[in-house]
Structures are given as C-alpha cells and as structure tokens.
Image (tube, grey):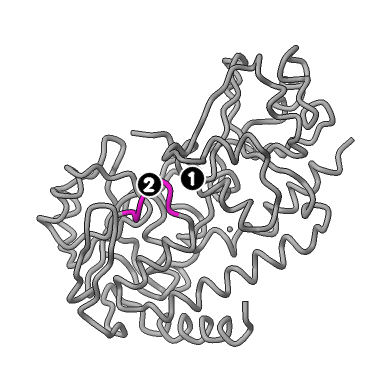
Amino acid sequence: MISRRLVGPLASALAALTAVAVTACAADADVRNNAADGFPVTVEHAFGSTTVHSADRIATVGWSNQEVPLALGVVPVGMASVTWGDDDDDGILPWVRARLDDLGADTPARYDETDGPDYEAVSDADPDLILAAYSGLTEEQYTKLTKIAPVIAYPKIPWGTPWDETIELNATAMGRKAEGAALIADLRARIDAAVGAHPELAAASTMFAYLDPTDMSKIGFYTLNDPRAEFLRDAGLPVPAAVTAAGRGSDEFYREVSAEQADRFDDVDLIVTYGDEKTLARLQADPLLGKIPAVKAGHVAVLPDSTPLASASNPTALSIPAHVDEYFGRLAAALTTS
C-alpha cells in the first residue's frame, strides 16, 4: 500500500450556517444520519456512478473520509485506522478524537488497511453507504466493496481528490449537499485568514517535497495532482515551473528527478518537506541539493515526520481548523529565515 506520506487546507453567513448545523447535530449525535434528506442521490466517480437511497449507517475506507460525516455531526459505524500522524497509537488522529469527544460519541469500529480494504470488517459494520472519495481503490476493490453497500469512489485520480471535493462528494452522498457547501465555505475562510496573516507567502513560489535522508541522489516532489501541492496553490502560493510541468497531462501525484537536475528548482522560493531538526543542515551539506536557492537560503519548512502536523499537511475537513494557522505560520517562519 502507498505510504501515507506519499499520498495522504467565505461568506460569514455560510460559516454561521455551518456552526448552527454542526451544533444541532452534536446535541443528539448518533451513528444514524436521520437529518439527511433528498434521497435518492447519484454521485459520479471514476468507476461510473453510485445511487444512494439511504445513509443511516456510514462506513469509510481510505484516508480522511470519516472526517466529513463527523464534521457534519454524524458518527460512522466503521472507519480505517490511521498510523501516520497518530499521536498516541490508538489509530485515531487527534482532531478526529476531539470531534468524537465533542459529539459525546463512542469510537467507531476500526479496521487495518495496511494491505488494502478489510472487507470482512467493513461488512461487520453493516453499513448502507461506504465513503471513499479520497482513496486509492482499484476497480477490483471497488467491486468487492459494492457487494457490501453502495460506494463513493474518487472522482478521477487515485489519492488525488482535493479536500473540498472530498467534502462535496461525501456530503452529497449523505444527502447533505448544502451542509457540505457551507462547511467548505467556512474552511476556505479559515485558510484565507491563515494565509492572510503572512503576506510574505503571497509571492513565494512553493514546492512540497519528499526528500529521503538515506538517498540524496534524488529529489522527490508532489505534483498538482496531489492534495498537498494543490492546497498550496489553492491558498494563493505561486507554483514552481517544475511542479506545474510535472502534473500537466499526467495522473502522477509524485515525481522524482536526479539530484543532478537540481537547477530545475532555481525558481523555488520555499520548500516544504517532512523531516527532523537535522534535515536542513543535511540538505545544505549536500553538494547538489545544497545548490538549490531555497535550500542554500535556509527557506525549508520542515514538518516533523509522523506527527499530527505532518499529517495535517494533507488537508482534511477536521485537520484544517485544527492546524491551518500553525501550518502557514511554520511556512512563513521558514521563508524569513536567513
């Protein structure tokens, strides 16, 4: 299975609507989606279309899909365990745990997806809808899951669904399209405020990279087909030429090039990557990577690997309000380092 590091952030009236809707749902949180209406609904996706007639019992597979019903006050009956970014080894990211606590809800059944969907565990949860708008399902996996319940797969590219489209697709399938739209508007306003607090980011050409400390012969980076890079662009940060070119006409969400081609990144002002306190010094000491202007200037925002903040770099319905200020604050701090 693909590493989560390689896989997996408007109007005030709409924001107020979100708050009212979520508060109302929190008062009587249940595994059932009784407030939903408008069924049946049909959702188009990569494997065709799925018509949903009810969403009383929702299970999720893939990364972060459970956060959409939770953000809307609905508790899934089953969800995938999370390992990367989990702060206490319980298989649940901290913002998901906080939301469950807010709702006064028990922890849903969890299943291990290290080797792909756990069909038996999903079936045991007895869902009438399976959300997987952000996932990497194969057609075979999708077909097997449909024997359990209707499935909402990703719209185009495996692991390529942006956070807002994940919310839109999953909320629509739940019969809560309007609430999903209000949630998206609220989160966009939060993102705009977080970026607006650091005006220096507006002109900073930014690349999200994955640099393997055991192999400095390559430079890995995410294309605009990946939600991490797309999030930066959507937030208003300029996109380097190499990142734009890599995603054009391709479904690839990640690309590697030889470190000998480091000059391809001369227009990069800021690099975001996973690592530790030694990452920047290691990059600057490398005879090839150290020549990249952003590296040479120390403009590298290092997200501590396998932490909640690192996980939040792949933005989701609940991680955005939890970490968006810290995330862009860290990027701005790296940009002003000299």
Quarter occupied by the N terminus = top left
Disc 1 marks which amino acid?
A: Asn
The residue lying at 31 percent from left, 85 percent from top is: 35
- Relative to 31, say whether 160 is above or below: above
Q: Tag 2's secondary structure?
A: loop
Q: Is residue 231 magenta?
A: no
- Whole-percent x, y for residue 270 in the image: 74, 39
| Residue highlighted by disc 1 | 225
Within-10-Å neighbours for mark 1: few <14, some 14–19, many 20+: many
Q: Is residue 198 left or right of residue 12?
A: right
Q: Is residue 332 left or right of residue 238?
A: right
The residue lying at 24 percent from left, 42 percent from top is: 138
Residue 214 got which mark?
A: none
Determine contact: label 2, label 1, CB under 8 Å. yes
User: Residue placed farthest to the left in the image?
Assistant: 147
Along the line of sight, the residue nearer the viewer: 57 or 254: 254
Quarter occupied by the C terminus = top right
Along the line of sight, the residue nearer the viewer: 319 or 12: 12
The residue lying at 59 percent from left, 41 percent from top is: 244
- Whole-percent x, y for residue 225 in the image: 48, 45
- Whole-percent x, y for residue 11 in the image: 62, 81
Q: Is residue 157 magenta?
A: yes
Along the line of sight, the residue nearer the viewer: 177 or 215: 177
Within-10-Å neighbours for mark 2: few <14, some 14–19, many 20+: some
| Residue highlighted by disc 2 | 157
Disc 2 marks which amino acid?
A: Ile
The residue lying at 54 percent from left, 58 percent from top is: 319
Along the line of sight, the residue nearer the viewer: 320 or 291: 291
- Tell me where the magenta segment starts and ends, as one range: 154-161
Q: CA distance from mark 2 to mark 1?
A: 8 Å
